[in-house]
Amino acid sequence: MKTEMITLKHGDVSIKMPSSALAKLAIASFFAQVLPPAANVQPVAPSTIPEIGQPWPGQGGLNGGFVHARGEVPAHYLIIAAKDVGDHKWGGRGVEVKGLSKTDGYTNTQVLIGNDDERKYPAADACAEHQADGHRDFYLPAAAELYQGWLNCPKVFAQDCYYWSSSQRSANYAFFMFFADGDQYYYGKFHELRVRPVRRFFI
């Protein structure tokens, strides 16, 4: 089948091309008019991510490392407060608080500070009250989050004391972390242990 040719003339210039090629050129020209050129799309510049254990400007603390999405919690970076907020009791001795986990410290803290009974949970309260760089969403880390701190940057924590997690073992005990050697066990809720707030930086 013979290809249909079309001749285009403009002044002294003439171009001869197949009609199918002209149709493609016309369609491309149309879309170039109605759609923004790709060159005008500005790529999003990635944020400068500090080394693990180093301060993250504007985020209220240190980069504790990347955390993959888990359940309903999207992927994020764990931000560790630059300093401890003292030694506190876990609180609520003799009461098994419902709804606590080994991985989600934020939810744990919300459950503890919003508890309807008259018992106080000083470790969780101290973390929830912490503020830095305008952020007010700090919480008492869960056992898994403290363990991540030990894996990624143990030296940013004190090496001579235990740190409370927000993860409960039973009515009388809760889990702690010892950063000198990675020991993770449980202790009586009435004891005063060291506390370090954390927060999440969602990406």
Image: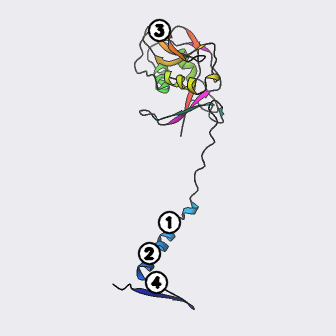
Q: Which of label 1 and label 3 is nearer to you?
A: 1
Is residue 164 shown above or below 72?
above
Label at residue 24:
2
> Which one is earlier in the sequence, the residue at label 4 or at label 1?
4
Q: CA distance from mark 1 to mark 3?
A: 65 Å
Main secondary structure type of the part rendered in magenta: loop
Would you name the residue on which mark 1 appears? 35
Taking the spot 46% from the left edge, 35% from the top edge, the residue there is 69
Q: Which of label 4 and label 2 is nearer to you?
A: 4
Q: Which of label 3 and label 4 is nearer to you?
A: 4
Q: Nearer the viewer, residue 146 or 135?
A: 146
Q: Nearer the viewer, residue 49 or 124?
A: 49
Q: Which of label 3 and label 2 is nearer to you?
A: 2
Q: Position of residue 168 (x, y in %)?
A: 45, 16
**Figure coloring:** rainbow
Label at residue 93:
3
Q: Position of residue 31 (x, y in %)?
A: 47, 69
Taking the spot 56% from the left edge, 59% from the top edge, the residue there is 41
Taking the spot 61% from the left edge, 13% from the top edge, the residue there is 161
Would you name the residue on which mark 4 appears? 17
Q: Tag 2's secondary structure?
A: helix
> Which one is earlier in the sequence, the residue at label 3 or at label 2?
2
Q: Tag 4's secondary structure?
A: strand
Identity, as a three-letter code, of the amino acid under mark 2: Lys
